[in-house]
Image (cartoon, grey):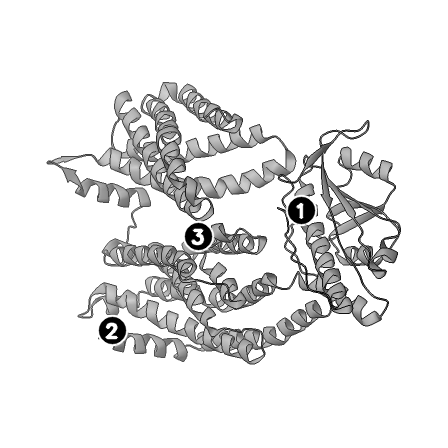
Amino acid sequence: MIEKMIRWELGRLFRNRKFKIAFTLQLLVILLIIPLFGSYVRALEEGGFFNLSIGGKGYLPIGISSEKNSLTDIISENKRFDILWLNKEKGLELLGNGRISAFLIIDKDFEEKIRSYRSSAVELYINTENPKGVSAYSELNSILLGFRDGAIEARVRDLSITEPTIQLVSQTPSSNSQIQQTQNVQNTAQEQTPVNPTNISDRPSNFQEQIERTRQSFEDERGGYIVLLVLLLPLFLSGGMLIDLLISEKERRTGEMLLALPIKREKIFYSKFISIMSIIIFQLLFWITALYFFGRITNPLVLLPLTITAILLLSITGFIGVYSKNYKDSALIVTVTFILLFFLLFGTSTLYVAGLKEVAAISPLSLVIAIENGTYSLKESAISMLPSLGFSIGLIYLSTVLYRKDEFYFGPRPSISDLIFEFAGKIQLKGKAYSAYLIALIFGFIAIFISIIFEIFFGIIALYFSESIFAILMLWAIIEELSKSIGVFSAAKYYPLKWHEGMLAGMTSGFGFAMLENIIFTIFTLNIFPDYAVRVFIMRTFLSGGIHIVSTGIIGVGIAERKYIIPAFLIGILVHFAYNIKVLEGAL
């Protein structure tokens, strides 16, 4: 029966004139993007730079003390740099007062040395108190390392010597920094990156190869990143079709005949889900085949993580379609959800390109880059796909549960808190219901995701306008306590809480928040610092977890006894903030 439903849904879609026009336009867009994408990659191969640092043209002001040479020419090609040509004293002065984000000192006879097989050095200074310093360091360090490697290869080739083994020291500013103490500059971290561009001969071909070697440092994993940008297009082009199917039936009341069929309602939902999924897979196959034919994709296995991403996208839109009562109701939810999902997926993928592969592995899109680069493993594949797949299955199950309820089709539609209240009332322990505490616990789980979103958003703003870490820690404490208090407010909506019951509800919400937060931290620690995973888990369970429980318990008393709500919030936030400060100072 479900096979007939799928064929019927697909036939209904392709008989619709609007859908046929939209589907044709999507294929035309894909066909148009392919030559544009090819032209863009060719531009990279011919010398264009591609980088992922924040900011636009002239975003990073840097100073250079040197005569113009081949290295400064390459640096000048990066449009994010606003270059000032300065002497050493003036450059260090501007670096100290924050006018420039980095300062390079290059030997005056740099060009002569690299052409005569001699070593030269480049001094790179950054100001660790300038937020742009890290971005400038990352950009310049990539260029310097690429230039050095190209010069070494040129010497090996021209002199026919054995290629030396080069061991690179940690390139992060914090690990290799020394404090430069002078009259004019204070608290300025000194990065001395010894560039050993041992030789470039006078022949133009060798010199050009050195420059191309530098450019190629931008085209390894970042080429996979560009492929990723293009491959996501079919997903977001077709992601809203499932919502259209579900909501159009509600508004036109055409779904009543489907509900009257002798078939389970969840199978109706599955038929819609599978029909849209088959269209997306067709588009992905068309897209991947075309890119593979043009030589822009080397491994068709990228279809697997993209399919997982498509399932994730459809499970979210399916849940929104079932829960929403009309297009107007779903428009804002879909827009916000797509924006958050886009930034989540690409944010983790950017971390992969930046070198934090263990952290970024949780995103299925990071696996696309790994497959393109040939660096994927079974463990990385499982970490990338299983969380998204598990979350998708959970959302699909919730969607089918809601789709079986008449009120989500005929109305009135219950709120999310009403649904949680209904769920909590069904769970009893020895004949006694603990609904208020279960509501608080569930919202404690939800609060972790709410706080992460707002902490990232407001944290970036706070970091831009204020360089104080204390302001950011206070901001995070406020966001987390407000997020956790939602559970207590929701419990108090359905049950009159006494002060001790409000305290227990708050402690329960804090416990749910802390438990899920510890799981997330432990997963990341296992990937980054596996030797410290147990220690981090124990410390966060008894210290961080205890603080979350205590601070939200105090707030719960204020919510139950409304006259104390403001003092309770202030005390709870201050307790949380004090703990953050102690952790920062290394006391805990």
Q: Amino acid at mark 2?
A: Ile
Reading the chain from its start, which is encountered first: label 2 or label 1?
Answer: 2
Q: Amino acid at mark 3?
A: Ile
Q: Nearer the viewer, residue 104 or 353?
A: 104
The disc placed on residue 333 is 3
Residue 93 sits in which quadrant? top right
Q: Amino acid at mark 1?
A: Ser
- Residue with the mark numbered 2: 2
Q: Is residue 583 above or below residue 322?
A: above
Q: Residues within 10 Å of mark 2 (few under 14, many from 20)?
A: some
- Residue with the mark numbered 1: 135
C-beta proximity under 8 Å, tags 1 and 3: no
Observer able to see residue 489: no
Q: Is residue 368 above or below residue 109?
A: below
State the image coordinates of residue 500 (x, y, percent, origin top left): 26, 22
User: Exactly how many numbered labels are in the figure?
Assistant: 3
| Residue depicted at x 84% and y 70% | 204
State the image coordinates of residue 131 (x, y, percent, origin top left): 66, 39
In three-dimensional space, the C-alpha distance between marks 3 and 2, rounded to whole angstroms, equals 29 Å
Reading the chain from its start, which is encountered first: label 1 or label 3?
Answer: 1
Label 2 secondary element: helix
C-beta proximity under 8 Å, tags 2 and 1: no
Q: Residues within 10 Å of mark 3 (few under 14, many from 20)?
A: some
Label 3 secondary element: helix
